[in-house]
Amino acid sequence: NAGVTQTPKFQVLKTGQSMTLQCAQDMNHEYMSWYRQDPGMGLRLIHYSVGAGITDQGEVPNGYNVSRSTTEDFPLRLLSAAPSQTSVYFCASSRFGVGDNEQFFGPGTRLTVL
Amino acid sequence: RKEVEQDPGPFNVPEGATVAFNCTYSNSASQSFFWYRQDCRKEPKLLMSVYSSGNEDGRFTAQLNRASQYISLLIRDSKLSDSATYLCVVLSASGGSYIPTFGRGTSLIVHP
């Protein structure tokens, strides 16, 4: 099993550009989440999904969209990138609940917005 | 005030030392508690869950104090490989789901 995969690993954007961060898991987990991690801030929940077709907002959802058309995939879209979105983005999946029991994280995407 | 607070450290200890971290949380209705480990520029990985009765996994002991609203992690006989950031995670009800809140992490450096 590959676990949780994320692409790309690194990305540089200009202000105003849009892009999609990809996340996929092969563990058949219902629950998936997106976090951002900034220096000194810890991980903050952006959006999460409790199953295909069901998504909800986390702590810092503004500027991001998500969709969950399949159990495996949970892409994160930046609509119009801003320098404040420079961060490391982690996708995670879990079996029993959003954050409940063990969360499995992808390797992260390091995004810089100029 | 952040819901989950940790001392960022760094805690700088020699090999073989015992070190303890605390994590306080503000939501008294929090449901579940975890410690994750994160190596530099890597993803977080679950270290251990924290049970009400306390639990131990080798050199690591986790405890929960609901009355004072904190959890702790004790590492005995520290190894160089224990150097990492330790993240406290608290699960609390939000709408119809339980949502995790991460602390900012405590940095541990174990030196020879």
Image (cartoon, grey):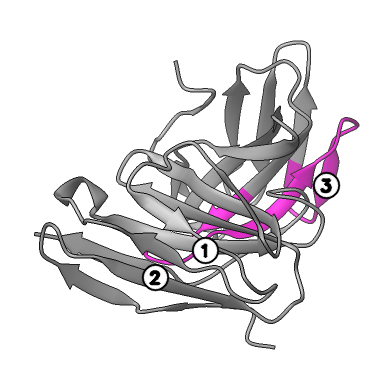
Residue position marked by numbered label 3 in the rendering:
B56
Query: CA gap, disc 1 to disc 2?
Result: 9 Å
Residue position marked by numbered label 1 in the rendering:
A91
- Taking the view exactly as shown, the residue that stands out farthest to the bottom is A1
Q: What stretch is highlighted in magenta?
A: B36-61
Coordinates of residue A100 in the picture (x, y in percent): 75, 48
Contact (Cβ within 8 Å) of mark 1 with mark 2: yes
Q: Earlier in the sequence, mark 1 or mark 2?
A: 2
Q: Is residue B38 left or right of residue B34?
A: left
Give the numbered dot on residue A21: 2
Residues at marks 1 and 2, common chain? yes
Counting the numbered discs, the total is 3
Query: CA gap, disc 1 to disc 3?
Result: 29 Å
The label nearer to you, 3 versus 2, is 2
Disc 3 residue crowd, few under 14, some 14–19, many 20+, Cα 10 Å: some
Question: What SS does tag 3 mark?
Answer: strand
